[in-house]
Image (cartoon, rainbow, N blue to C red):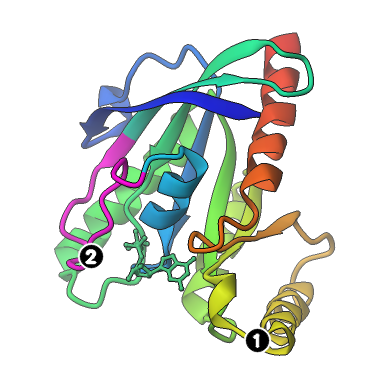
Amino acid sequence: MQITKASYLISSPSVDKCPKPDRPEYAFIGRSNVGKSSLINMLCNNSKLAKISNTPGKTQLINHYTIESTSTKSNKKINWYLVDLPGYGYAKRSQQQRKQWSKMIEDYLHKRKTLINIFVLIDARHEPQQIDFDFINDLGEWQLPFTIVFTKADKEKPGALERNIKLFFDKMRESWQFLPQYFITSAIKKQGKEEVLDFIDDCNKAFVQQ
Ligand code: GDP
């Protein structure tokens, strides 16, 4: 799939304020500083689309981007939404802000009928973090479809990268019968872009055929 145009649309404080659910939608979420903005910019060929911020956790809004794309397989044009969700694990968030975040995210994930897939971003440099599993286990409990995107793959030597990924899935196996699909990405090396976009393309096809 090729993205022909990507533009910021709106930031919403709740699912009820989100744009009309008239097209497939894909959400991106992860821990603060995981590389979400960089990944979104890489996917959309636009280095300024999502803000690469050094002051994480300031905004707690659901951010919609309008994406126009052409399938490289069928040549069909399709519009979809990319959604940048505020992440979890910001140390500086107050108890009140954490509650607000949980409510907004849970509402959005449960109620957004056109949400096709949640991309959960995991920093490939780190060993498995409990906070990521807590979020993934919630998704499992709510039976929501998700895939894992390992980020910053360029920062690790191949051996260390493989080890972290293996540790991650070993830990997942403790409570999961089936493991999710995953992608290995680097915004610096533009790694994993085709794979993520092709996955979205395949999901879009299924959506259109419904
Ligand atoms: P966000 O807070 O999750 O949106 O993360 P950002 O995209 O703002 O990235 C956080 C930091 O990680 C920034 O300093 C980025 O330059 C860096 N970063 C993001 N992606 C990559 C990557 O693929 N490789 C490397 N080496 N650094 C990255």
Q: What is the span of residues highlighted in magenta in the rendered image?
A: 47-63
Q: Residues within 10 Å of mark 2 (few under 14, many from 20)?
A: some
| Picture residue at 34% right of the left edge, 71% below the top | 89
Q: Position of residue 20 (x, y in %)?
A: 37, 14
Ligand 1's image quarter is bottom left
Q: Where is residue 146 in the image (x, y as percent from the top left)?
A: 63, 48
115 part of magenta stretch: no
State left or right for residue 189 relative to residue 87. right
48 part of magenta stretch: yes
Image quadrant of residue 58? bottom left
User: In this view of the protein, which residue sits in the foreground, 182 or 17?
Assistant: 182
Magenta span: chief secondary structure: loop
| Picture residue at 68% right of the left edge, 10% below the top | 76
State left or right for residue 86 relative to residue 155. left
Rendered view: 163 above or below 85? below
**Image quadrant in which the C terminus is located:** top right
| Any part of residue 145 in sight | no
Rendered view: 93 above or below 8? below
**Image quadrant in which the N terminus is located:** top right
Rendered view: 31 above or below 162? above
State left or right for residue 192 relative to residue 110. right
Ligand 1 is within 8 Å of the C-beta of the residue at disc 2: yes
Image quadrant of residue 97? bottom left
Q: Which residue has dot 1 on it?
A: 157
State left or right for residue 99 relative to residue 71. left
| Picture residue at 25% right of the left edge, 24% below the top | 17
The amino acid type found where label 2 is placed reads: Pro
How many numbered circles are shown? 2
Q: Which residue has dot 2 on it?
A: 56
